[in-house]
Image (cartoon, rainbow, N blue to C red):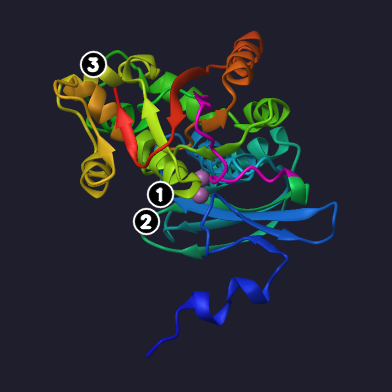
Amino acid sequence: MLRPITETFAASAFPDLLVGIEGPDDAAVYRLTDEIAIVQTVDFFPPVVDDPRQFGGIAAANAMSDVYAMGGEVLLALNIAAFPEDLDPAVIARVFHGGAEKVAEAGGVIAGGHTLYDAEPKYGLAVTGVVHPDRVIAKAGARAGDALVLTKPLGTGIVLTAARDGRDPAGHAAAAVVSMLALNRHASHLARDAGAHAMTDVTGFGLLGHADEVAARSDVRIVIDAARVPALPGALAYAALGIVTGGAARNRDGLADRVRLPAGLDAAVAHLLFDPQTSGGLLVALAPPAARAMVRRLHDDGLPGAVVGRVEAGAGVVVE
Ligand code: CO
Ligand code: CO
């Protein structure tokens, strides 16, 4: 019998591991001193766009997002990459360049990495950040009465699938790329300043999947107001044409017991709410006046953001 990892590393034996695998969150948090904890995360994946530099930037923004989702600041990162042996070195250089310029934009530094050969290219980062041990913003912590802010529109899965299949005649993928390249850093600062109670980033499980994680970890119910959820240009139109990802169907199946959809919800809107996001926005629970102020500050600073729901006593996720 293999011993579960959670037994080998029982949380009680590691009091400085503030966030680990027993309460999975966006990133691990380990206290070094009363003033400093390190935030550690790793993420990498195959190309989501054809342009190598954009792919590198998106993968880096996505990897660093888990540090921002904990309320942390990025210090350094290591490249993790795999490329086919026959791939043009100039293409590989552009992937690394795209990642490097994103880490530089974040105020961090790339300090090394590891690359291997594989038939399918992959790129991402192992990221180390810091946070004050008392100011970690976890998925637990949302309170009944809170409002929910989402800091990027949804639909990267739908729009990228349309583009990949040659069904994006309007070129909406360009806006999706801009959104995926955007760092969650400033939004994280605003959430921290606004006194966020709970925060995560919206990625592969879609808005409803990540909302469910917050609901479960915080022991609350999350209510999403579907009419207020922002969509990327083209996302709803393409979803209405039947362009959706396999991931959205898996998300929907996996959440069947936890998510209640209203009768008659528009099918395209439902697809949007389950759509897996790459480098998606932050989902933040905070007091309603603070939420409204945060959205105003996001807009003042030229960033998207909207109040998309609220937190109630109960369990699961309800869409209305
Ligand atoms: Co995350
Ligand atoms: Co993550």
* Residue 292 image point, x, y percent: 58, 14
Checking the image for residue 46, the label placed there is: 1
Q: Is residue 129 visible?
A: yes
Check disc 1 and give the amino acid type.
Pro
Checking the image for residue 237, the label placed there is: 3
First along the sequence among labels 2 and 3: 2
**Mark 3 nearby-residue class (10 Å; few <14, some 14–19, many ≥20):** some
**Mark 2 nearby-residue class (10 Å; few <14, some 14–19, many ≥20):** few
Magenta span of residues: 135-151
Residue 149, magenta (yes or no): yes
Q: Tell which residue pokes out farthest to the front in this image.
A: 313
Q: For residue 191, which quarter of the picture?
A: top right
Left/right placement of residue 13 relative to residue 168 reads right
Q: Give the CA distance from mark 1 to mark 3.
A: 26 Å
Q: Give the CA distance from mark 1 to mark 2.
A: 7 Å
Quick check: 70 above or below 227?
A: below
Query: What residue appears at the point 56 percent right and 57 percent down from the top-left corner?
Result: 80
Quick check: 124 above or below 4?
A: above
Left/right placement of residue 131 relative to residue 306 reads right
